Image (cartoon, rainbow, N blue to C red):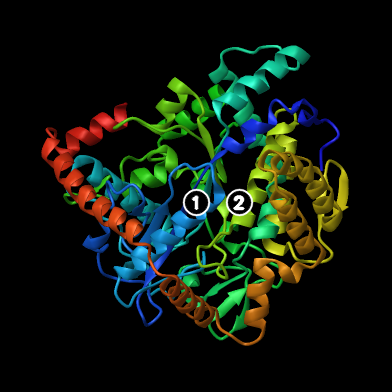
Amino acid sequence: MLHSECTSTLSMITDELIPHLVEIGRGVEKEGLRLNPCSGIAQDEHPKSLGSTLTHPSITTDYSEALLEFITPKQTNIDDTVNCLTGLHQYTLKNIGQQLIWPTSMPCRLDGEKSIPIALYGDSNVGQLKHAYRQGLGVRYGRVMQAIAGIHYNFSLPDSFWKAYQSKFVQQQADQEQGSLQEFKSTHYFSLIRNFRRYSWILHYLFGASPALDASFLENHTSHNLDQLLDGTYGLPYATSLRMSDLGYQNSAQEELHVSYNSLNDYVTTLGDAMKQSYKPYEEIGVKRGDQYIQLNTNVLQIENEYYSDIRPKRVTFSGEKPIAALKERGVEYIEVRILDINPFLPEGISAQQMRFMDAFLLHCLFAQCPQNSDTRCQEIRGNQRNVILRGRDPELTLKRGTEDVPFKVAATELLDAIMGTAKLLDKAHDSFDYTSSVYAQQAKVDDAALTPSGQVASTIASGIEFIDFGMTQAQIHRKHFSSIGLDSDVEARLTEEAAQSISDQIEIEKADTLSFEEYLNSYNES
């Protein structure tokens, strides 16, 4: 579904460019709460057998000590990425005793704010900074919101593709200001990001898996618009992703932020301004409570990662380097999609088929050359996203396209038809039918909302099964699945070695500190 003012560069992707698509790089960051056998969030520290959360390359924690995060390396083969996720789940389950990994994005049963232990990263300055930042998230937004889990999808194209693609632009004079290869990459990654925001409503529908939640999540929500579906379960009849609604990763302090995605310079400038802008309610909280740091500073954003964006431009950083500085200095290296729910029916939370569709979707966003976003268009984008999040499976749903109201199924089918073009290119590159098949599978969900993950969850709850009971059942099913296929001995040996090495690395970092934490934090805030 291209807007009338958009064009496509799909025709530029000739036989000489297609082979470069085999080298698409991808990685997955998958979160999941450690769960005690009584369906509550685990209260113990991150197991030492899993290594150091500060330095382990693939097993760490996010906000909470109980919120596991699995990180796969950049890989060009989708099956390798899935297998990596499988191994990380197997190894972790083998090292957490009788505990389980909660399989849904919305959390397990909570017992108030204090039941969510904040992640610990040791005594080094960088470890204390990570902990203090999370303390800040807790005092600013509450810990309950931080117990939500999700999947991040990292995507990049190889330099060989970018060189050939830039050459096509030069030949067709489609870009008046070419600049360096890195400048070209950054420009077009930001174009991808803008188009992602235009079209991401389709991802909420296709992969949203959180139409309901446990009543304990609402303890501090005095007002909400959810229906009581069962004694301990709340939700909305047509919702796709309550995780991405106002109940999830949203906050009033950021509502007035206007971070621009029109260019790398605009993004760095507007995000940097938010990191320097003090916010009175945070000033009133203060930076310290006694001797303990409870936030890094009183600015709207403590650091860049506090900005709850649905997609981010990224660049691998050097030790001690801020992400925004890395972007400014060396440009965009890859993009990170942040809106995907965990699919509770899949052991890994995401499938190879979904990854293939994501690649086709993101390539479509790259090739759809649309103008920069205006305030009016931004309002339309947010409105469409919100409507699909809250009532995406409503057969009466329409989306805005300028002044036009378009039936959801019409808009979704048009968009999938357009994505089929990039899926065919990927199939040609891989000599397969896997990518076009992934698009056909999504069209089936558009034709029948009951096939969506959110539809399947809603159907389970409609049968009288509480959200907590559903989650516990799926967690146990996944544990049995991972146990049944057996952990590869080479994978186990590698992860055991990485765990031990990560602990040694943390000790060395702690030994190398020369500044007090206060001096380190002052230097960090001023940089």
Report if residue 52 is visible in the image.
Answer: no
Question: How far apart in space, not on screen, are marks 2 and 1 (Cα)?
Answer: 10 Å
* Residues tagged 2 and 1 counted as in contact (Cβ below 8 A): yes
Kindly identify which residue carries mark 1: 81
Kindly identify which residue carries mark 2: 355
Which residue is more in the foreground, 38 or 508? Answer: 508
- The amino acid pointed to by label 2 is Met
Mark identifier at residue 500? none
Q: Nearer the viewer, mark 2 or mark 1?
A: 1
Residue 83 image position (x, y, % from top left)? 48, 57
Which residue is more in the foreground, 186 or 356? Answer: 356
Corner quadrant of residue 139: bottom left
**Is 441 above or below relative to 130?**
below
Identify the image quadrant of the N terminus. top right
Identify the residue shown where x is 32% and y is 71%.
Answer: 42
70 sits left or right of 233 in the view? left
Tell me the crowding category of disc 2: few under 14, some 14 to 19, or many 20 or more residues within 10 angstroms, Cα based: many
214 sits left or right of 464 in the view? left
Residue 453 image position (x, y, % from top left)? 65, 67
- SS class, disc 2: helix
